[in-house]
Amino acid sequence: MKVAPSVLSADFGNLQRDVEAICEAGCDFVHVDVMDGHFVPNLTIGPVVVSAIAASATKPLDIHLMVENNTFFVDLFAPLKPEYISFHIEEEKHPHRLIQKIRSLGIKPAIVLNPHTPPESIEYLLGDLDMVLLMSVNPGFGGQSFIDTVLPKAKKLSAMRDKINPACLIEVDGGVSDKNVHLLKDAGVDIVVAGSYVFNHANKKEAIESLQI
Ligand SMILES: O=C(CO)[C@@H](O)[C@H](O)COP(=O)(O)O
């Protein structure tokens, strides 16, 4: 299991220190939550702060867009050369076109599904994706409880992925800890995003390693 700590739970007064700390502690990706105050009822960071994160990070960025105008934000963040840009299927009229655009910029395209969105909604996109991100909380905030219906959903998606595009990774985000990571692994998940679990832990290396099972 690979681990992408969510910077949303970092101390923003000491962002450089916290980003360096998770990278030194052995995380696999740095997960960056971009919220516009419209698609979700919260507002986070834009390209100025994300470029400061990129400058401190020694691990690849995994940018999760929670925004209304995906194309505008893809253009804003592409120059930072993240590993992944993920966008919500619920907010995109032309997801296939956007996948092609992200790939043409040299970035791996990923799609995010909210807790209620079925995996079948992306059946005909799966072959073109590098990753699918399943939300296990309602997007917008860190520190929420894990919604366990993501487990059968991840299993279903994993079976679809094995048939259609075995190289496509499955990531789960929200309420992840050492208590549920084994269940996620059994369901076929490859990457977990963890915010409060990693940043509230006294020893970040220990926290990250407890998820890298
Ligand atoms: O995208 C989001 C929330 O919208 C997540 O990345 C959270 O930031 C994860 O935080 P925890 O649930 O692990 O505290």
Image (cartoon, rainbow, N blue to C red):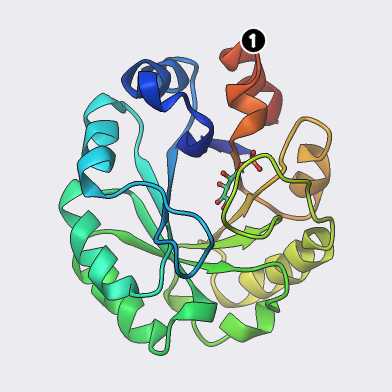
Residue 103 in view (yes/no):
no
- Residue drawn where x is 78% and y is 64% of the image: 155
Q: Nearer the viewer, residue 122 or 186?
A: 122
Horizontal and vertical percent position of residue 27: 49, 27
Horizontal and vertical percent position of residue 191: 59, 45
- Residue drawn where x is 81% and y is 40% of the image: 180
> SS at mark 1?
loop
- Residue drawn where x is 32% and y is 21% of the image: 16
Residue pushed farthest left? Answer: 79
Q: Which of 59 and 44 is in front in this view?
A: 44
- Residue drawn where x is 27% and y is 74% of the image: 71
Q: In this view, does 135 lie to the left or right of 19?
A: right
Q: Quadrant of residue 188?
A: bottom right
Q: In which quarter of the image is the C terminus?
A: top right
The residue wearing badge 1 is 202
Q: Quadrant of residue 105?
A: bottom left
